[in-house]
Image (cartoon, rainbow, N blue to C red):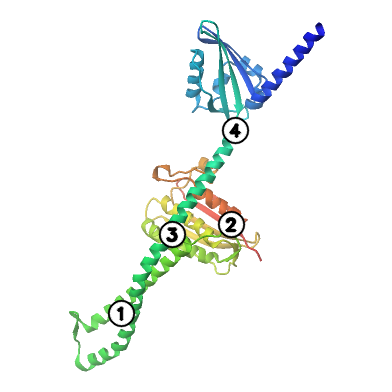
Amino acid sequence: MERIYNTIDSDEQRYYRLLNYLTDYIYTVKVKDGKAVETYHGPGCVAVTGYTSEDYKKDPELWYRMVHKDDREAVLEQANQALSGKNVQPLEHRIIHRDGTIRWVKNSIVLSKDEFGNVLYYDGLINDITELKRAEKLAEAKQAQLIQADKMVALGTMVSGFAHEVNNPNNYILLNAQFIQKVWDDIKPILNEYYEKNGDFVTAGIHFTKSKEKIETAISSIIDGAMRIQNITRSLTDFARKDTGELNQDVNLNQVIKNAAVITGSLIKKSTDNFVINYNYSVPLIKGNQQQLEQVLVNLISNACHSLGNRDKGIKITLLQDNEENSAVIEVADEGIGIKTEYIKHIFDPFFTTKRDSGGTGLGLYISYNIIKSHGGKLTLKSEKGKGSTFRVILPINK
């Protein structure tokens, strides 16, 4: 008979250990007159929290202090509802592990009552869901990227149509202006000869000696303006065209910078009077995807413009070659407001943004970081609050 009892005890111990393993960690709260009088934390608590059962026994308030400060109100509410005899839903919240890291847990409570409905005790089942939360966050980031990609496709279609519509009348303007330029070049000697023989005369209410300079300037300005419109629409069309995603193009980084500056031209003019580009035509071509790299530069220039406090503050883009590391480096430096030190380590995280109030999504730098990483390069940041920021795009040169 004794052997049978020992077998039962052994089975119960194995069952107890298995239950603790399956649920990560169990705690039990004894209740008297609607108040907690004793709490026991099972041995699995060490794996989840870093604290032992003895730690919780010695320090009854430890369970509360380890809860993340932003979640304490919800955790207390769950506990109070359980003490009052209400059935409560599982609660997901954060805790501070003994090693200082933040972890996510799911706290499920099961009540035990007497025949009168009074709570005698309740068991809490704690599951560590940190990895699940991390996977959910990653899935959200991927979904946001897909949404952003859909937006870019729609925007690309719209931009291509817009560029086509603008190009048609602009081509008429350019062709007619160039025709007028040729006409003027042909008749100017005749008018000059007439002036030499007959003296000054009036055209469009202005004496010829003055009007000829205005005519030349006007024709030249029309042609220059039409050419600029042509360059802008061409850059927009190239930027918006369907991207195959392949990284096997021969990319001229000087052209990448030039195109990005054209695309962001209106924002640059609105933001600063001090915009400088230092090209470096000795930097060789790199293997990559020009459209993706332009997307990175457009994002960095836009961020730099938004960081400036006034038009006197400047932005400088510099293309360098690091022969020791066999890499090309694009520096985007601004004299803006800078970034707090505690924010820098999170700046490339998905959904992290310092511009939430102005519509920032926290995806621009995250996507840019991954584009550069896919090119075998690095995207780094040096910044100090109030003293500006410098982003460095480092890309390998394949010789």
Q: Residues within 10 Å of mark 2 (few under 14, many from 20)?
A: many
Q: Residues within 10 Å of mark 4 (few under 14, many from 20)?
A: some
Q: CA distance from mark 3 to mark 1?
A: 39 Å
Q: Residues within 10 Å of mark 3 (few under 14, many from 20)?
A: some
- Ranked by sequence position, the earlier of labels 4 and 1 is 4
**In the drawing, does residue 326 fall left or right of residue 211?**
right
Q: Which residue is mark 1?
A: 216
Q: Amino acid at mark 4?
A: Thr
Name the residue located 54 percent from the left edge and 28 percent from the top edge: 92
Residue 366, relative to residue 87: is it above or below?
below
Q: Residue furthest bottom?
A: 197
Cβ atoms at labels 4 and 3 below 8 Å apart: no
Q: CA distance from mark 2 to mark 4?
A: 33 Å
Q: CA distance from mark 4 to mark 1?
A: 71 Å
Q: Amino acid at mark 1?
A: Glu
Q: Which residue is mark 2?
A: 394
- Ranked by sequence position, the earlier of labels 3 and 2 is 3
Q: Amino acid at mark 3?
A: Thr
Name the residue located 46 percent from the left edge and 60 percent from the top edge: 240
The quarter in which the N terminus is drawn is top right
Judged by depth in the image, the label closer to the viewer, 4 or 3, is 3
Cβ atoms at labels 1 and 2 below 8 Å apart: no
Judged by depth in the image, the label closer to the viewer, 3 or 2, is 3
Label annotation for residue 157: 3
Q: Please, what secondary structure does the residue beneath circle 3 have?
A: helix
